Image (tube, rainbow, N blue to C red):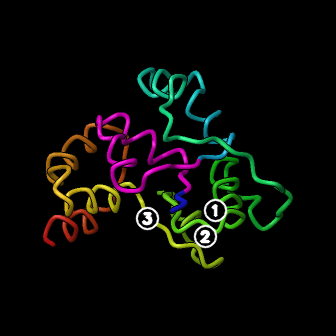
Amino acid sequence: MIIVADTSPINYLVLIKEIEVLPRLYGKIVIPEAVREELLRPEAPEVVRLWTAQSPAWLETRTPASIADSSLARLDAGERDAILLAAELNAQQLIVDDREGRRIAKERGILVIGTLGVLKEAAAMGFVDLRDCVARLQTTTFYVAPEVLKNLLAE
């Protein structure tokens, strides 16, 4: 199974101390070099920078063969490269939160899931308590529309 991730889901899962759900659910995760660079930026939370600098064996960093795709110009480098890498590797799923990135990936036939979807899957497997994870997410800069959150927790 090949799963590609963008910056935001990795960032938030590290912040709420649930990053280990990724290998439990999917095995190996692939991120583009641009995502690794974003996670290591000085403005990234220190815990995220430290985790990334000592990333586990299940996290693989790759660079897409080509980044020349003008249709992705409005995305940041991490989202652009994650979409390109997911398509190139024929990934089973792309973990991305950005609305525009999700839309473009779906248009390209790439299955997408976001941070909340990952946590929902992890909760269904008994790995996490979804309400607790959502409460911790809400202490970060993570944004989700109130109606989306209400529907998720009602399921």
- Local packing at callout 1 (Cα closer than 10 Å; few below 14, some 14-19, many 20+) is many
Does residue 137 appear to the left or right of 90 in the view shown?
Answer: left
Q: Identify whether 55 is placed above or below 73.
A: above
Given the image, on which type of amino acid does mark 1 rest? Answer: Ala
* Among the two numbered marks 2 and 1 on one chain, the one whose residue lies closer to the N terminus: 1
Q: Residue at x 45, y 28 (%)?
A: 48
Q: Residue at x 68, y 67 (%)?
A: 87
Tell me where residue 29 appears, x and y as whole percent: 51, 49
Pointers 2 and 1 in contact (C-beta within 8 Å): yes
Residue position marked by numbered label 2 in the rendering: 105
Q: What stretch of residues is rendered in magenta?
A: 4-30
Q: How far is disc 3 from disc 2 in space, using C-alphas?
A: 11 Å
Disc 1 secondary structure class: helix
Residue position marked by numbered label 3 in the rendering: 113
Q: Is residue 8 magenta?
A: yes
Disc 2 secondary structure class: helix
